[in-house]
Image (cartoon, rainbow, N blue to C red):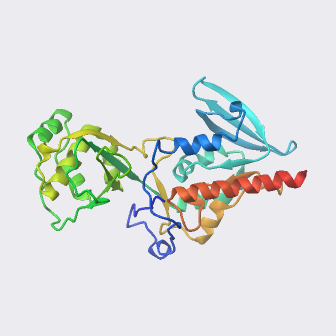
Amino acid sequence: MILSIDFNRNHLLYTEYSNYENPPGAYENELKNGGYRPFINYLKSFIHNDEQIRLNCEVTRVKFLVEERKLLVEINDLQKQQTKTMLCDHMIWTTSLGYLKDHFRRIFTDEKDLIQQKQNAIANIGFGLLNKVVLIYTNKFWRENADSIKLLHTRKHQIFEMSDMLRQQLHAERIDPNVVQEIAHELSYCGVLPSTNIPVLICWFAGPIALIIENLNEQIVGQICHETICSYLKVDQNSYPLVRTLKSEWHSNKYIRESYSYQSIHSNKHDEHELRTSYAPDGVQRILFAGEATHEQHYGTVNAAFETGIEAAKKVLSIVNSRQ
């Protein structure tokens, strides 16, 4: 499972946060042997006609046709740069809550009842930013059995001493040196990737600093993290040079728009229920909503996204089978 993190303490509803439950099973923050692709390929193996799968297509409009009792779906084919339409009986909507916050009214502009049903839930439930910075090394400088590195900042205004090389990089990119201090002070957790022989650390950043990191190049962000970690562990940073840095940019991704949902001070149980509720304009569930934000206890996890998707698919199959 992948844990949700406190993205904004000023907006987090603590009473509701206490109701959050971890999914059963061992904690896992990585997928081995190719990430999600083997899992996706397994699911895809049950669909024998590849033409049924539309990749690189953006749904731009959904409208329920009363007389036909069908959903008219407008799709923008990004590769062919063409707009297409298709008719369907049911739809499972699984985009992130962040994407809904930005595009819900535009996509479902013809469905006033749906907008009325969900607009408050979409606006009230929180959706925060968490980014990861991946540091790749040739040799380890941490304990062999360590599963994480946690940095304890005991002095609020401690000045982080950066190397001359980093200082030159900042000058060349015209970056305010204070940004280095902000990143160094916010770096408190690094996960160790255990499933590879290549030494890898994964640094987690949440909230405003995660957005700042998106706007910096990977090399500078990686060097800041590297020097901060080495400083705390009292390790010579030059003896264990950083080979490569990767970073996520979930806010910049127009189809995600940040990372995970959380219960905010503006949301309540009714909002949670309305976000999960299907849209049935003719008494039949036509648009079902799934995704991590729609799970009652495990929101913010891959488990939640998978489970709610399976539940929605079962509902659709039940409706289809009942007609036969």
Height in image: 30 above or below 3? above
| Viewer can see residue 279 | no
**Image check: 33 left or right of 187?**
right
- Residue placed most toward the observer, 28 or 224: 28
Percent across and percent down for residue 283 are 83, 57
Residue 212 image offset from top left, x and y in percent: 31, 47
Residue placed farthest to the top in the image? 80
Residue 223 visible somewhere in the drawing: yes
Seen at 47% across and 69% down, the residue is 265
Relative to 40, 186 lies left or right = left
The x, y position of residue 31, in whole percent, is 46, 49
Image point (34%, 54%), residue name: 204
Front in this rendered view, residue 89 or 173: 89
x and y percentages locating residue 127 in the rendered image: 48, 57
Q: Residue furthest right?
A: 324
Left or right: residue 157 versus residue 291 is: left
Q: What residue appears at the point 72 percent right and 49 percent down from the top-left corner?
A: 111
From the viewer's perspective, is residue 57 above or below residue 275? above
- Above or below, comparing residue 189 to residue 140 in the picture: below
Counting labels gives 0
